[in-house]
Image: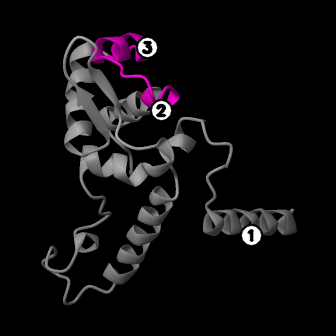
Amino acid sequence: MLRISRLTDYATVLLATLAGEPARVQTATALAEQTHIAAPTVSKLLKQLQRAGLVTSTRGLHGGYQLSRPATQISAAAILDALEGPMALTDCAAGHGHCEIEESCRVSRVWQRLNVAMRRALYDVSLAQLAGLDATPARLPGLEREMKAAAGRTQVRS
């Protein structure tokens, strides 16, 4: 099953909280209190997000964390990459030379196409949309077409 880790989910919650007040520098302790995520986990995630360039930190008495760029410019793909590394559904989707049977495999091209489609969908969703701050709904036209077609087939059978 495809599923993001709990830490990635928590990191998204932290980023969404920072996105709610982008000009405010927030401490790890304040973020832990607001999100009800354990303080050590918050600190660990903020360090990972900082290394990935998604948040910046300020030291000192009035220090803390804030987004490194507007929430509209941070994609779901960037968040996943920061916490889990680049997504690859299969070894062959990770690139040439990662699979022992790629020379004789008949399904790798389809897996690679699916991987690209999923990455594209993740790039099309911004942190602002995830946080509910962007009135523009996330649009996935290919998926919407498929769902309409499936609904139409279901109605015809009834």
Is 84 located above or below residue 100 in the figure?
above
Residue that badge 1 annotates = 149
Give me the residue at 63% from left, 58% from top.
Answer: 139
Give me the residue at 40% from left, 35% from top.
Answer: 12
**Circle nearer the N terminus (3, 1):** 3
Mark 2 neighbour class, 10 Å CA radius: few under 14, some 14 to 19, many 20 or more: many
User: Which tag is nearer the camera, tag 3 or tag 1?
Assistant: 3
Magenta segment boundaries in residue numbering: 18-37
Residue 136 within the magenta-colored segment of the rendering = no
Residue that badge 2 annotates = 19
Is 117 located above or below residue 101 in the figure?
above
Give me the residue at 87% from left, 62% from top.
Answer: 158
| Mark carried by residue 34 | 3
Q: Secondary structure at mark 2?
A: helix
> Label 1 amino acid?
Ala
Mark 3 neighbour class, 10 Å CA radius: few under 14, some 14 to 19, many 20 or more: few
**Circle nearer the N terminus (2, 1):** 2
Q: Secondary structure at mark 1?
A: helix
63 or 55, nearer to the observer? 63
User: In the displayed structure, does residue 141 sit left or right of residue 155?
Assistant: left
